[in-house]
Amino acid sequence: MPNAPTATTVSPMRRANHIWANSVWFLPLGIFALLFLLLPSIGLFIGSVTGGPHGVTLSYFGQLFQNQYLDAYKVSIELSATTAIVGAAAGVALAWAVVGGGLPGFLRPFFLTFSGVASNFAGIPLAFAFTASLGPVGLVTLFLSNHIGLNLYKHGFSLFGFTGLAITYLYFQIPLMVLLMVPALDHLKQWGEAASNLGANSWQFWWHIGLPILRLPLLGATLLLFGNSFGAYATAYALTSGMINLVPIVIGQELSGNVVFSPNLADALAVGMIVIMITVFAVYLITNRNEARWQR
């Protein structure tokens, strides 16, 4: 009579079946990532190292160190960092006003719904809305000039430059930060009630509990805002007519052939953007690992 299977032989089989059953649910996500993230990235890399007279070449990556392309990366990083930091600060303040600032409960769904709509309002409609509001003859510009005596454009402001583009980006960056931080602050509110019951004052709560808990979600949300701004194209192009030196706009120019036509150089520029984003999120992963070790 064959021996009955022992616990040591059945347990690994059950564990394998359990892992496989759980992994099946992630299969659609894996297919999506393969088709729309991994394969396009591989295609960009192949395009960036081919197309030369001698087959495989690194000349397109060498061109990235020319001043015009370095300046494009510099402006893109500055714009993304500025809107990410300002958007994160303003978004956290508004999110805390929703969670712990005494906002009437019936207003919270409307505020979060507006944040969801505004965070996805970008591209040509957003550029037109800001042109109609803060353009040279926009409603806000004329109101300030006629009723307050403040002419924004005589004081050096321009909607179609770096500052104007940053203000436009904040329209969707701040609501996105609100959506990202409201769940974290909801969770933190419970910790605040527990700390208050144990006798902790406001300073003690934020220094020993609030900031350590929010550090990782805040960093992750800020990096997401950075990436959201770093890859934006339609809003910047529609607002500035492609006159600002951003990497997405330069890529569009290389592909459209308005001045030159070099799809391989455009691929190299895109690979450079991917490297920057990987570097940024590597910082987040390292911080996440250190945070997990600290929590253990």
Image: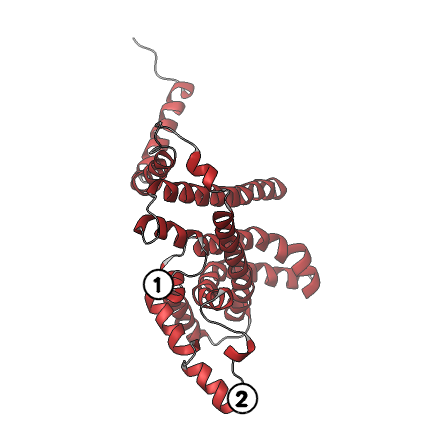
Could you tell me which residue is drawn at 39 percent across and 28 percent down?
A: 15
Residue of label 2: 149
Q: Distance between the residues labelled 1 and 2?
A: 32 Å
Instruction: State whether residue 175 is above or below residue 247.
Output: below
Could you tell me which residue is drawn at 47 percent across and 42 percent down?
A: 64
Q: Residue 15 carries which label?
A: none
Could you tell me which residue is drawn at 45 percent across and 64 percent down?
A: 169
Residue 115 locus on image (x, y percent): 41, 67
Could you tell me which residue is drawn at 58 percent across and 44 percent down?
A: 287
Please say if the residues under marks 1 and 2 sit with CB atoms less than 8 Å apart. no
Q: 284 or 7, which is in the foreground?
A: 284
Q: Residue 123 carries which label?
A: 1
Q: Is mark 1 on a helix, strand or loop?
A: loop
Q: Which of marks 1 and 2 is nearer the N terminus?
A: 1
Residue type at numbered disc 2: Gly
**Image quadrant occupied by the N terminus:** top left
| Residue 270 image-quadrant placement | top left
